[in-house]
Image: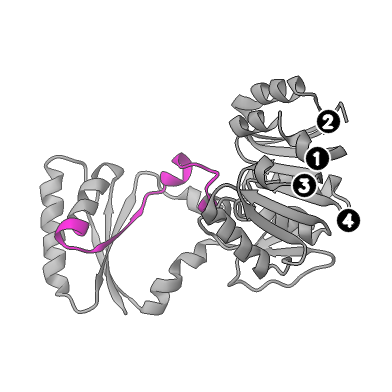
Amino acid sequence: MDCIEFKIETTTAAVEAISYFIADTLEGGVEICDPKDAINQDKTQTWYDFIDESLLDADMNTVFVKAYFNKGINIEEYKEKISAELEHIKEFLDVGAAQIIVSEIPEEKWANEWKKYYKTFNITDKIVIKPSWLAYDVAGDEIVIEMDPGMAFGSGTHETTSMCVQLLEKYLKKSNRVLDVGTGSGILGIVAAKLGASVLGVDIDPMSVKVAVENVAINGVADNMAVVQGDLLEVVAEKADIVISNIIADVIIVLAAQVRQVLKPGGVWIASGIIDEKKAAVLKAVEKHGWEVVEVTEKNEWVALAMRDVNA
C-alpha cells in the first residue's frame, strides 16, 4: 500500500518528543534520521559494515523525523496537528527549522528505499562482498560472497572482519579444516569454504545459526560448511587446522585456555574483535596459556592476532 510521508527537519534534542507524538497520538510509523548515530553507535553492528561512508559527511546538527501514514488520511489536517505540536515542543526544546515536507511514497519505493545505501565492496583484492540485489561482473580470480545486511554480526567492511579474511588468505591451505567460533552471519566460514576449506561454524545464538545456515546455502557452500548451535567444547569433536574467533576481547581471553583442545598441532588460531584498549590484556592472557603470537594486524582501533600453540 502506498503511504504518506511527513519529513520534519529538527534537532536531536526534540526527536524523542516529536516521535512520541507521532507514534502515540497520531498512530503513525516513525523513522529517525540522525547523522550522529553513525558515529555514536556500536561499529560492530551489521548495518555499519555496509553503510555508505558518504552518509558520515551529513550536517551533524540537522535531524529528520519521518512520519508515515496510510494513503487516504487528511493531509492538511495531519500537517496542522504536527505543526501545532512543534510549536508546543518549541516552548521547552530547540526544534530547529521545524520545516515539514509532505510526500507520497509508492509501495515499491517504500519496500526498497533502504537498499540504495548499501554497496558492493572488496574486502581484500580477491574477496568481494555484495548485497544480493546488486549485479557484479567477476574479474579474474575474484571470489564473490553474497551477504545482505541482517540481524547477525558480520558482513564485511568492519576492520575485525576484513583483518580475519586477510589472515585467512595468508594461512589457509586448500583441504584445511576450519572452525569458525562465534560464526555470526557465517561470513568468515563462507570465505574459508570458498577458499577450499572444510568448515564448521559454531554460535551460541540461535538467530545467528539460522542466518548463517541461510547464507551458507545462498553462497553454495553447504557441501563443505556446516553450522551448529552450542558452546565450543560441547559441540566440536574434530580438531581443526585453523580456528577463527572474531568475537570480543573478553571472550578471546577465556578461549585462550580452550582453543588448543580443538586445534591440531601446528595449527593457527586467528583471533579478532580486539579493541586496542584491550590488546595488552589479550596478549598477556594468550602468552600465559602458551600461545606464540606470530602476527599482529591492526586497523584503526582494532587488533587481530595469528597464533600457534608453543607446546604443540
- Counting from the top left corner in percent of width and height, residue 301 is at 62, 33
Mark 2, residue position: 309
Write the residue at 21% across / 52% down. Answer: 20
Left or right relative to 23: residue 285: right
> Label for residue 174?
4
**First of labels 3, 2 by sequence position:** 3
Q: Amino acid at mark 4?
A: Lys
Write the residue at 56% across / 60% down. Answer: 210
Question: Is 39 included in the stretch rendered in magenta?
Answer: yes
Q: Are marks 2 and 4 in contact (CB under 8 Å)?
A: no
As measured in the structure, the alpha-carbon distance from the residue carrying label 3 to the one carrying label 2 is 21 Å
As measured in the structure, the alpha-carbon distance from the residue carrying label 1 to the one carrying label 4 is 17 Å
**First of labels 2, 4 by sequence position:** 4
Looking at the picture, tell me which residue is in the foreground, 131 or 97: 131
Q: Amino acid at mark 3?
A: Gln
Q: Amino acid at mark 2?
A: Asp
**Comparing labels 2 and 4, the label whose residue is closer to the camera:** 2
Q: Are marks 3 and 2 in contact (CB under 8 Å)?
A: no
Mark 1, residue position: 263
**Comparing labels 1 and 3, the label whose residue is closer to the camera:** 1
Identify the image quadrant of the C terminus: top right
Among the 4 quarters of the image, the one containing residue 66: bottom left
**Comparing labels 3 and 4, the label whose residue is closer to the camera:** 4
| Region in magenta | 22-47
Identify the image quadrant of the N terminus: bottom left
Mark 3, residue position: 166
Left or right relative to 85: residue 40: right
As measured in the structure, the alpha-carbon distance from the residue carrying label 2 to the one carrying label 1 is 9 Å
The correct choice, above or below, for 299 with respect to 48 in the image is above
- Counting from the top left corner in percent of width and height, residue 228 is at 64, 54
